[in-house]
Image (tube, grey):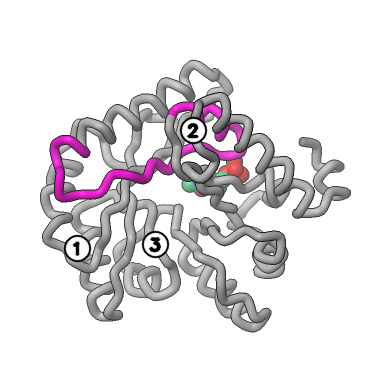
């Protein structure tokens, strides 16, 4: 989509288009449409953009910075938007766990046993149970964050999670490498799914039902490979301005 198209289309039009593409990918994969959730990634866009998306029927959002969403959540309250579910999808530093536990409805980027312990403590002191995903790094170029699939840290985290009652493990998330090579992207999503199947068999006390994978450029492939949550920013909200 060109930026001109973005400036003349409404959010509702772009949403309808994405919905069609998701439905078609589900049909190709022989999956029910309800098996894939659409997360609208609203990072860098103002609270008014979230309000517009909520009005168009979106209920699930992703934000990648604690401070940015802290400001926006106040704007959203002022706009009277209270129904949006917002997940943290960016790296979380452990000194921001308390704030993150307070303002987000889930943390999709847990990437160390230490972070899980900190989140457990902050969720406990808020009296809430926080759904989490474990972020996996499947290639060097894909992302700076996430746990190696074969590493000790992942093993340690999964062994610890059943004893952290304020965290509710829901599954795995990953970011595919930005190569433009469909075969590489597909292989990445297939590895996350296989890893999930292996880990789920080895850890019957943990829930691995969620596979958060797929962004604007690769969500159709992700759905074909089993994604249960696609995280779409640019294709819904238009291009983001570069950050300093
Ligand atoms: C920004 C972001 C997205 C959305 O990216 P688009 O390419 O704009 O759809 C998805 N997931 C994560 C983790 C992100 O940081």
Quadrant of the rendered image containing residue 98: bottom left
Left or right position of 82 against 166: right
Quadrant location of the C terminus? bottom right
Quadrant location of the N terminus? top right
Q: Earlier in the sequence, mark 1 or mark 3?
A: 3
- The Cα–Cα distance between marks 1 and 3, rounded to whole angstroms, is 15 Å
Residue 21: image location, x then y, percent: 66, 35
Pointer 2 local density, CA inside 10 Å: few below 14, some 14–19, many at least 20? some
* Residue 17 lies in the magenta stretch: no
In this rendering, the answer to whether 92 lies above or below 105 is above
The residue that mark 3 highlights is 106
Residue at image location 31% in from the left, 46% down from the top: 171
Residue at image location 32% in from the left, 39% down from the top: 136
Left or right position of 119 against 68: left
- Of labels 1 and 3, the one closer to you: 3
In this rendering, the answer to whether 46 lies above or below 146 is below
Decide if ligand 1 comes within 8 Å of the CB at mark 3: no
Residue at image location 66% in from the left, 60% down from the top: 57
- The Cα–Cα distance between marks 3 and 2, rounded to whole angstroms, is 25 Å
Q: Are marks 3 and 2 in contact (CB under 8 Å)?
A: no
Pointer 1 local density, CA inside 10 Å: few below 14, some 14–19, many at least 20? some
Q: Earlier in the sequence, mark 2 or mark 1?
A: 2
Mark 3, secondary structure of its residue: strand
- The Cα–Cα distance between marks 2 and 1, rounded to whole angstroms, is 36 Å
- Of labels 2 and 1, the one closer to you: 2
Q: Earlier in the sequence, mark 3 or mark 2?
A: 2
- Of labels 3 and 2, the one closer to you: 2
The residues colored magenta run: 200-225
The residue that mark 2 highlights is 31
The residue that mark 1 highlights is 117
């Amino acid at each position: 989509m060109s930026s001109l198209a973005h400036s003349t289309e409404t959010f509702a039009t772009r949403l309808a288009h994405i919905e069609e593409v998701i439905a078609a990918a589900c049909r190709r994969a022989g999956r029910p449409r309800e098996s894939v959730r659409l997360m609208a990634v609203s990072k860098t866009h103002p609270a008014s953009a979230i309000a517009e998306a909520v009005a168009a029927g979106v209920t699930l959002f992703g934000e990648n910075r604690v401070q940015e969403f802290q400001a926006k959540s106040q704007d959203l309250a002022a706009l009277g938007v209270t129904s949006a579910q917002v997940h943290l999808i960016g790296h979380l530093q452990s000194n921001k766990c308390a704030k993150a536990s307070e303002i987000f409805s889930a943390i999709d980027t847990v990437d160390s046993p230490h972070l899980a312990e900190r989140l457990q403590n902050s969720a406990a002191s808020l009296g809430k149970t926080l759904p989490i995903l474990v972020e996996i790094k499947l290639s060097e170029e894909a992302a700076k964050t996430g746990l190696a699939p074969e590493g000790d840290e992942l093993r340690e985290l999964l062994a610890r999670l059943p004893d952290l009652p304020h965290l509710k493990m829901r599954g795995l998330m990953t970011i595919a490498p930005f190569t433009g090579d469909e075969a590489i992207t597909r292989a990445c999503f297939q590895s996350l799914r296989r890893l999930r199947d292996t880990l789920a068999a080895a850890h019957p006390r943990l829930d691995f039902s969620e596979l958060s994978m797929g962004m604007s450029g690769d969500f159709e492939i992700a759905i074909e490979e089993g994604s249960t949550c696609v995280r779409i920013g640019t294709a819904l909200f238009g291009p983001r301005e570069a950050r300093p």
